[in-house]
Image (spheres, helix red, strand yellow):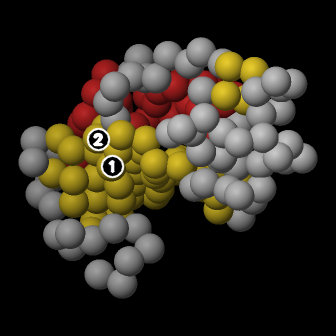
Amino acid sequence: MWNLAERGFGFRDLEIPTRPVWRMQASSLIGESDRALPSGVFPSIFSTEVIDGFLKGFSNASWFDGVEEVALSRRAGDDLFELRYVRDGKNFTILIQKSKHDLEELSLALEYILNRLRLEGGNHLIDATYTDKVVVKSLPAGAREGSSR
């Protein structure tokens, strides 16, 4: 991963696991440099520290193994991580804004919530975008956060 804020496209080695799949909002605004990017490299509005901090906070959690996809975007000026999590044939969408929670506490809370929800049927949205609380909603089959279903 390259950090364009560093002179000369400073390469930064991140320990990103092969799973989950990552999706990030790209940006054409990559700074003042007009240098061409290497093939397969795209500009992003997110710093490498954002991704690195997320991975350090959650990648060792036992529940993180069930995460199939992480989408990184912005909501209300804050980084938003949307995780697609599958456990025992049930689908969960987990929304996380790191600035709203201590990551260690949130990880423990998510482990507890996911263990409780595995006993229930259906799909769920777990929304950790509020300060000091996590909201859990039931979703109809196939629904995603923000959809009209």
Residue identifier under label 1: 84
Compared across the picture, whether 42 is left or right of 45 comes to: left
Number of marks in picture: 2
Q: Which mark is residue 68?
A: 2
Which circle's residue, 1 or 2, is located before the other in the chain? 2
User: At x 34% / y 25%, what residue is drawn?
Assistant: 18
Q: Residue at x 27, y 71 (%)?
A: 143
Please report contact status of discs 1 and 2: CB closer than 8 Å, yes or no: yes
Q: Amino acid at mark 1?
A: Arg
Q: Is residue 32 above or below residue 146?
A: above
Would residue 133 be found to the left or right of residue 21 on screen?
right
Amino acid at pointer 2: Glu
Q: Residue furthest right?
A: 32
Whether residue 97 is visible to the viewer of this picture, yes or no, is no
**Front in this rendered view, residue 10 or 90:** 10
Quadrant in the rendering for residue 7: top right
The quarter of the rendered structure image containing the N terminus is top right
* Number of other residues with Cα within 10 Å of mark 2, as a class: few under 14, some 14 to 19, many 20 or more: some
Neighbours of disc 1 within 10 Å: few (<14), some (14-19), many (20+) = many
Q: In the picture shown, does residue 131 fall above or below 144? A: above
Q: Quadrant of the C terminus?
A: bottom left
Residue 55 appears in the figure:
yes
Question: Residue 59 appears at what percent x and percent y?
Answer: 43, 23
Tell me where residue 36 sits by quadrant.
top right
Where in the figure is residue 128, as x and y percent of width and height?
A: 52, 50
Q: Which mark is residue 22?
A: none
What residue appears at the point 40 percent right and 68 percent down from the top-left corner? 145
Q: Secondary structure at mark 2?
A: strand
Closest to the observer: 49 or 102? 49
